[in-house]
Amino acid sequence: MTGLSFIHRFEAGTSSHTLLLLHGTGGNEHDLVPLVYQLAPGAALLSPRGKVLENVAPRFFKRLAMGVFDEEDLKAQAADLARFVHDATRRYGLDAGKVYALGYSNGANMAAALMLLHPEVLAGAVLLRPVLPLEVAPLPDLTGKTAFLAAGTQDAWSPVARVQALADRLEQAGARVQLRWQQGGHQLYPEELSAAQAWLAQNLA
């Protein structure tokens, strides 16, 4: 669907909560929809497509090399996405205080950036294979917000230290954080998706 600043997919839900779906590198606005049908079937879905192309692969912000992010582009793209969420909640009549992100890889990093740079946009987030995308000083006040992080202990794309750094910054900012480690790499496993489902059921109740 067009008409807002991102190509996106929207589906109304039966609850008052909305999940902002943020795909990984090379994904699109449809990638995470089946996952949300499984994890939080009652939520409304707002799923934008990343505007940045790496070769032909959509992303939400530029990177300079593996694990090296273009922080100026990240800040600009996060501001653009924050505006999109604000405009979309008005257009679709959504509760702006009940928007949670669900992001994978590059999308999880963008969701983390939204929490750190534009905390008013999200009530919380499910971050699948994230890292700390950038340092923010001073940290925002994330009191009352919550995050579920799912990380792999052998994930070359999301190193343990950078995952832990993200959990630490979110906690230091006042968020309630659940960090779940999985023996594995960058792919997702059924047991951690079950944990994410339980987290969503609790927080979207």
Image (cartoon, rainbow, N blue to C red):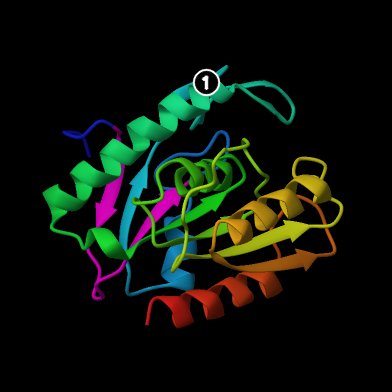
Residue 17 magenta-highlighted: yes
90 lies above or below 52: below
Q: Residue visible at 50% across and 21% down?
A: 73
x, y percent for residue 27: 51, 39
* Start-end of magenta stretch: 6-22
**Residue named by callout 1:** 72
Quarter in which the N terminus is drawn = top left
x, y percent for residue 18: 31, 62
Is 45 or 160 nearer to us in this picture? 160
Which quadrant holds residue 101? Answer: bottom left
- In this orientation, does residue 186 appear? yes
- In this orientation, does residue 50 appear? no
x, y percent for residue 160: 82, 51
Q: Is residue 32 left or right of residue 121?
A: right
Residue 54 magenta-highlighted: no
Q: Amino acid at mark 1?
A: Glu
Q: Is residue 103 left or right of residue 9?
A: right
Q: Residue visible at 42% across and 57% down?
A: 33
Q: Residues within 10 Å of mark 1 (few under 14, many from 20)?
A: few
Q: Residue furthest front?
A: 138
Q: Is residue 7 left or right of residue 190?
A: left
Q: Residue visible at 66% across and 43% down?
A: 132
x, y percent for residue 72: 52, 20
Q: Residue visible at 47% across and 23% down?
A: 52
Numbered-mark total: 1
Which quadrant holds residue 164? Answer: bottom right
64 lies above or below 191: above
42 lies above or below 123: below
Quarter in which the C terminus is drawn = bottom left
Which quadrant holds residue 8? Answer: top left
| Helix, strand or loop under label 1 | helix
Is 187 or 86 nearer to us in this picture? 86
